Image: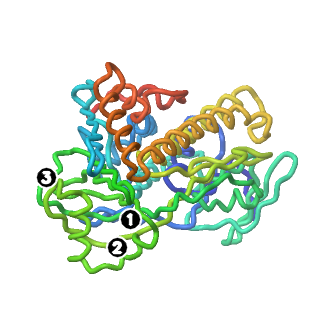
Amino acid sequence: MMQSVDIAIVGGGMVGLALAAALKDSELRIAVIESRVPDSELQELADVRVSALSRSSETILRNLGAWQGIVDRRASPYMAMEVWEQDSFARIEFDAKKMAQPDLGHIVENRVIQLALLEQVQQQSNVTLFMPAQCQTMAIGESEAWLTLDNGQSLTAKLVVGADGANSWVRRQQDIPLTHWDYGHSALVANVWTQEPHEKVARQIFTPQGPLAFLPMGGSQMSSIVWSTEPSRAERLVAMDKLEFNKALTAEFGARLGLCEVIGERFAFPLKMRYARDFVTERVALVGDAAHTIHPLAGQGVNLGLLDAASLAQELTTLWQAGQDIGTKRNLRGYERWRKAEAAKMIAAMQGFRDLFEGDNPAKKLIRGIGMQLAGQLPGAKDEIMKRALGLKGDLPDLAKYSLSSTQL
């Protein structure tokens, strides 16, 4: 059976669903193809894969009608941030109140974001969900693309969007080259109970082995950790018995929140930077991790992806309303230039930050300490850093600029 749509979104995760939701008021017919149906039942213990949602992401999700669904499930606002270096005077703090902000962001499980968006997309008359289903073949023609799915369904689309993650099937089908490098680290993620309450403060320590972040979760003593360290060490930490791991974690964090106790499972995954040479080809566009992945140092990965989705939706709506072909590379170049520039800035910033904090050379430690002191003391410097992190600066799509909802938390 053949079905004809305007846009086929391959990947029904956070970014793919955000794109579908952003096109809710358009006449575009959309298919969303996703291999796994997320479990709608949340356990008492949070998932270990979480994201730090910026203000711009919150605004996008509010405008898509998904924010209330996130809050109703669970979201943990953080009111301040502390960053410091082990064995050095390098330190900087950020406070929401001093910046006249309600908070600095929210720590939210990825599945919670996905479920809240799915809830909205399921109500859209212009969206057909193929879930669970996987793409088997893709062929690109002059005016449309053809997709076959593993359930026997066939689709034609004016545009195929790859929202299928870092190992994107869509990107591979198009043989789009990647600029990439291995950060030489793995990220260990887990839920951790701490002896002292986190007080809704996100904390990150830089050590010679890599950064360790404690992100405040629901409950005053639960945090999600992201521990970036050398791969073989990450494997050893995952394999350790709980008591040994708890000791290692408490020591690495300088017992800042007292004794630490890991709750539930630990996972580690390699950290790699990826940047697709092309974000668009004929009849194909990439968004989110399919187009770029960055170091989780500042938790900006999903925020970049949601901005991709909002930006592409804006460009597609403009093209459609002007009667233009939404699938040609020429017409999609505006989206590509826009998002490649923003992604490149973020990749460069993360790499520069990582390089600055790498190693324990005394001269570098001195520079880091002075630099952090200056950033903390110079008028407006801290505000500028946080405005970038909050997504309040840069070339933002309309969906990220202001909330259409009058309901504020």
Q: What's the colour scheme?
A: rainbow
- The type of residue carrying mark 1 is Leu
- The type of residue carrying mark 2 is Leu
- The type of residue carrying mark 3 is Pro
Q: CA distance from mark 2 to mark 3?
A: 24 Å
Give residue 96's position: percent from left, percent from top: 25, 31
Q: Work out whether residue 232 can be spotted.
A: yes
Residue on which disc 3 sits: 197
Give the label on residue 352, or none: none
Kindly identify the residue that appears in the image at 53 percent across and 45 percent down: 305
Give residue 64's position: percent from left, percent from top: 46, 39
Query: Callout 1: helix, strand or loop?
Result: strand
Residue on which disc 2 sits: 237
Residue on which disc 1 sits: 188
Q: CA distance from mark 3 to mark 1?
A: 22 Å
Kindly identify the residue that appears in the image at 18 percent across and 53 percent down: 256
Kindly identify the residue that appears in the image at 25 percent across and 69 percent down: 248
Q: Earlier in the sequence, mark 1 or mark 2?
A: 1
